[in-house]
Image: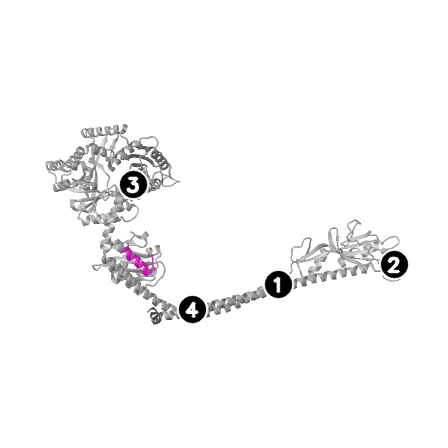
């Protein structure tokens, strides 16, 4: 069956034929290239050999020419010495009875020899080798020594050759002085005449002129290829003539080689072009067949992927699994790495990346005027195909995004739910490409399967965001205590462990001097360093973020002595570290208090309380600033007892004060205020709640203090604020709500003052919602007409179920959700909570508004109630009333 299929497949047959042709062309091309290379190699070898032979031949010719010139000069010198030696006048003048005629010698053998014949040295020598007369370069010289090598003992005939004279090589010729005619008798022992040329002076000059070798010179140690020895009569070299031989063969090679290479290049280019044309024709045919086969393969892969996604849907796969499968199949089919799902936020043209094959862009957002044109194109055409995305006018608004991520081509499919555009399936390529029709159709079919999951993806993203907020701290990236619950349970099963609270001192100074961003950066750096240090084998601990400037440490083991040494080293290391940067380091100080499980308590909250007690003692230590909890805290307990007594006396002495922080609506009008408790301590001055509320709750004094606050607030509402519509908010503790008589007391206070209950708001923290027995009390208070507000919403334990069951009236957005606006233009978590409050029809008050940018953001989100330092700081009662009067007067 397979054989028949292969025979019936024309595309396969054509492909095989074209492949064979391509292989034949390739083999022929390789053979021709090899032949050309061989021809070039042979021709180069021949040229190199010919050039070498020509160079050698010319070198031999040059040496022979120099030798010939030397021989001619020697013969001329011999002839010149014979002309003077065999001459009647010289015979008579030299062999005179009273000795050589000096005048004749000076006349004939003086300057005349050097000026006319160029002879450098002339000697008159007796038969016994005594110099009678000497002329050097035309000047007579005193008779002296140094002529031994020139004088040949017993020489009777003419002699010539090379010798050393005064350590300089010379070419000499000598002959006996004889009469020219028979009229004069020959001397019994005739004198000899010796003429010489200095080789290093006149002789080399004559050779350079005769041979056209400008660098020919005399040397004692030859170092060049061209050289000729000047040998003494005994055969020993006296010196060398040296020159640089010319290389006509190399010149010929340099001149002919470019033409040879050009010829070979032209031949190779012609052959390459010919084969390239033949190959391109074959490849074009083969590419057509390949494209057909690839299209068939893509269609088959697209069908398989669609069926796989449909099966996932039919088998009730969870949304994450389906979404990852869809992105992965799309990436595989299109052979790209960038496939993402972007969803539109409700009521806006703001795209947010909810899932992507590129993790770095998840949660990124796109907005701006240019995005509106892009979305309008999708609403009109459903599919947006851009082979050249950067020059496509439809994507002009996304040009910054395209350049940032190096995107060249795009294929975007709109996701429509109930006829409304809800998102985009975006396929991006970082290299140029053409999107095929079958690919566009496949992505469109995938988007149909994806549309039914869009709403669930939005809900899941909100839940994940809230979960991350509950379990991890945004500033440090460390888990919260809730995020460490599983680790705490594991440590309980393992045995003993220590719970520590680390206090970081100095962050407030950084915030005040450099800004909140620098304080957050320092705390993040502390968290990172602490996490790395606790991960070492000697500690093997975990860390978590606590409220305020505190971190929690979980350390296995119960050996406090060894643990103390490690922790002291850790504290010293943290103290010595330059925070933020080494050039201008910030000074931070650390204190650590610990309590042990199970010896100090088996309850985690109780362990944290006792670790806090140990921390207070550690902060008073002069060194190390480390303390473990024990039952005899001594001075600490006395201080706490004193604080409790002072709190009791404060009520009777009227030391408590109320400050009020105004709340404003979107138009800047005062809506009301939050009542904040202060203690005017006789010794320590004005104290904030953080300095005494914990002890008030611990001692039970929070109930009478809370009742006092309620009375003061109601007196203010029934008195100076009676004719206004301002609302005052009061914080209520868990101990007050646990008191069965709290609700009747509140009702009695309202009735005694004739106060409308809707002007009073009771604020409770989120953790109270999960406290047993609290929700019925809150429901009873709400039944009186009071408003219930959740304070610091989003930082505790709230859930949609509790909000629905309790039906609270107001939630207060904690400042932690607005802090991101200090460094970036958006706060997604704040938007989610605002949308949640709007969906549940709850009043929302934004706390901690510290910048104009936060006010602008909240205004765009439709938030109508705000409070914070940017609007007004907490102020005493009288100052608040003056503000109210001024506000009402305005």
Answer few, some or many: residues within 10 Å of disc 2's Cα (few below 14, many 20 plus, some between 14 and 19): some
Task: Look at the numbered discs 4 and 2 and tell me whether their residues touch, using CB distance below 8 Å.
Answer: no
The residue labelled by disc 2 is 186
> What's the magenta region?
323-337
- The overriding secondary structure of the stretch rendered in magenta is helix
Q: Nearer the viewer, residue 98 or 301?
A: 301
Task: Look at the numbered discs 4 and 1 and tell me whether their residues touch, using CB distance below 8 Å.
Answer: no
Which one is earlier in the sequence, the residue at label 4 or at label 2? 4
Residue 857 locus on image (x, y percent): 25, 48
Residues at marks 3 and 4, CA–CA distance in whole angstroms = 68 Å
Residue 879 locus on image (x, y percent): 21, 36
Q: Nearer the viewer, residue 395 or 275?
A: 275
Q: Nearer the viewer, mark 2 or mark 1?
A: 1
Q: Is residue 347 visible?
A: no
Q: Report the side of 846 relative to 75 (left or right).
A: left
Residue at left offset 19%, top offset 49%? 838
Residues at marks 4 and 2, CA–CA distance in whole angstroms = 104 Å
Tell me the SS state at disc 1: helix
Q: Is residue 703 above or below residue 51?
A: above
The residue labelled by disc 1 is 52
Answer few, some or many: residues within 10 Å of disc 4's Cα (few below 14, many 20 plus, some between 14 and 19): some
Which one is earlier in the sequence, the residue at label 3 or at label 4? 4
The residue labelled by disc 4 is 22
Which one is earlier in the sequence, the residue at label 3 or at label 1? 1
Q: Tell me, yes or no, whether the highlighted magenta stretch contains residue 325.
A: yes
Answer with the quarter of the image where residue 95 lies. bottom right
The residue labelled by disc 3 is 544
Answer few, some or many: residues within 10 Å of disc 1's Cα (few below 14, many 20 plus, some between 14 and 19): some
Tell me the SS state at disc 4: helix
Which one is earlier in the sequence, the residue at label 4 or at label 1? 4
Residues at marks 2 and 3, CA–CA distance in whole angstroms = 134 Å
Which one is earlier in the sequence, the residue at label 2 or at label 3? 2
């Amino acid at each position: 069956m397979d054989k028949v299929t292969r025979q019936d497949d024309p595309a396969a047959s054509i492909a095989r034929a074209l492949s064979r042709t391509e292989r034949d062309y390739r083999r022929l091309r390789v053979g021709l290239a090899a032949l050309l290379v061989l021809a070039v190699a042979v021709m180069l070898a021949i040229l190199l050999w010919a050039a070498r032979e020509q160079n050698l031949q010319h070198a031999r010719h040059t040496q022979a020419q120099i030798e010939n010139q030397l021989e001619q000069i020697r013969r001329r010198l011999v002839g010149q010495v014979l002309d003077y030696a065999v001459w009647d006048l010289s015979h008579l003048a030299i062999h005179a009875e009273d000795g050589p005629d000096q005048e004749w010698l000076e006349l004939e053998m003086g300057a005349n020899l050097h000026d006319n014949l160029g002879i450098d040295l002339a000697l008159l020598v007796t038969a016994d080798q005594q110099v009678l007369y000497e002329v050097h370069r035309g000047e007579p010289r005193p008779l002296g020594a140094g002529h031994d090598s020139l004088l040949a003992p017993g020489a009777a005939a003419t002699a010539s050759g090379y010798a050393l004279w005064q350590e300089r090589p010379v070419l000499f010729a000598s002959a006996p002085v004889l009469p020219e005619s028979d009229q004069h008798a020959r001397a019994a022992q005739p004198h000899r005449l010796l003429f010489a040329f200095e080789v290093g002076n006149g002789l080399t000059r004559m050779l350079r002129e005769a041979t056209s070798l400008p660098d020919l010179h005399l040397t004692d140690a030859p170092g060049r290829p061209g050289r000729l020895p000047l040998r003494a009569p005994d055969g020993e070299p006296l010196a060398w003539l040296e020159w640089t031989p010319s290389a006509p063969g190399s010149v010929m090679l340099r001149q002919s080689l470019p033409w040879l290479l050009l010829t070979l290049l032209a031949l190779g280019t012609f052959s390459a072009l010919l084969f390239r044309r033949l190959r391109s024709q074959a490849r074009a045919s083969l590419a057509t067949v390949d494209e057909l086969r690839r299209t068939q393969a893509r269609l088959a892969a697209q069908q398989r992927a669609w069926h796989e996604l449909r099966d996932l849907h039919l088998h009730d796969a969870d949304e994450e699994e389906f979404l990852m499968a869809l992105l992965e199949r799309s990436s595989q089919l299109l052979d790209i790495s960038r496939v993402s799902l972007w969803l539109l936020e409700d009521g806006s043209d703001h795209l947010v990346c909810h899932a992507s094959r590129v993790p770095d862009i998840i949660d990124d957002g796109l907005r701006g005027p240019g995005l509106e044109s892009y979305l309008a194109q999708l609403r009109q055409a459903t599919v947006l195909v851009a082979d050249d995305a950067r020059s496509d006018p439809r994507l002009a608004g996304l040009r910054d995004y395209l350049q940032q991520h190096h995107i060249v081509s795009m294929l975007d499919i709109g996701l429509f739910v109930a006829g409304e555009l809800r998102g985009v399936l975006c396929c991006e390529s970082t290299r140029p490409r053409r999107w095929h029709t079958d690919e566009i159709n496949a992505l469109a079919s995938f988007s149909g399967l994806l549309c039914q999951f869009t709403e669930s993806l939005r809900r899941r993203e909100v839940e994940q965001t809230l979960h991350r907020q509950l379990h991890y701290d945004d500033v440090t990236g460390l888990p919260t205590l809730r995020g460490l619950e599983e680790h705490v349970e594991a440590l309980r099963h393992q045995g003993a462990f220590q719970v520590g609270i680390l206090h970081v001192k100095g962050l407030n100074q950084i915030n005040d001097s450099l800004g909140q961003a620098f304080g957050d950066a320092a705390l993040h750096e502390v968290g990172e360093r602490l996490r790395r240090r606790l991960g070492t084998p000697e500690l093997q601990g975990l860390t978590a973020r606590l409220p305020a400037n505190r971190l929690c440490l979980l350390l296995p083991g119960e050996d406090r002595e060894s643990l103390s040494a490690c922790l002291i080293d850790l504290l010293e290391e943290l103290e010595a570290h330059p925070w933020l940067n080494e050039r201008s380091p910030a000074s931070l100080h650390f204190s650590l208090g610990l309590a042990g499980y199970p010896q100090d308590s088996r309850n985690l909250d109780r362990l944290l309380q006792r670790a806090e007690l140990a921390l207070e003692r550690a902060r008073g230590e002069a060194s190390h600033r480390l303390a473990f909890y024990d039952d005899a805290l001594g001075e600490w307990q006395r201080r706490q007892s004193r604080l409790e007594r002072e709190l009791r006396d404060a009520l009777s002495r009227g030391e408590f004060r109320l400050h009020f922080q105004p709340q404003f609506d979107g138009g800047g009008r005062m809506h009301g205020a939050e009542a904040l408790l202060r203690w005017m301590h006789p010794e320590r001055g004005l104290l904030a709640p953080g300095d005494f509320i914990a002890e008030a709750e611990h001692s039970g004094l929070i109930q009478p203090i809370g009742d006092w606050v309620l009375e003061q607030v109601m007196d203010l509402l029934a008195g100076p604020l009676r004719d206004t519509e301002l609302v005052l908010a009061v914080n209520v503790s868990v101990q007050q709500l646990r008191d069965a008589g709290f609700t009747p007391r509140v009702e009695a206070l309202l009735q005694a003052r004739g106060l409308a209950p809707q002007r009073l708001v009771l604020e409770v923290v989120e953790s109270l919602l999960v406290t047993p027995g609290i929700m019925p009390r809150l429901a009873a208070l709400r039944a009186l007409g009071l408003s219930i507000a959740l304070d610091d919403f989003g930082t505790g334990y709230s859930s949609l179920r509790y909000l629905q069951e309790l039906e609270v009236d107001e939630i207060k957005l904690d400042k932690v959700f607005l802090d991101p606006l200090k460094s970036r233009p958006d706060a997604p978590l704040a938007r989610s909570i605002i949308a949640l409050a709007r969906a549940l029809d709850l009043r929302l008050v934004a706390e901690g508004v510290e910048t104009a940018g936060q006010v602008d953001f909240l205004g765009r989100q439709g938030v109508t109630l705000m409070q914070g330092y940017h609007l007004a700081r907490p102020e005493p009662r009288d100052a608040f009333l003056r503000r109210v009067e001024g506000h009402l007067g305005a």
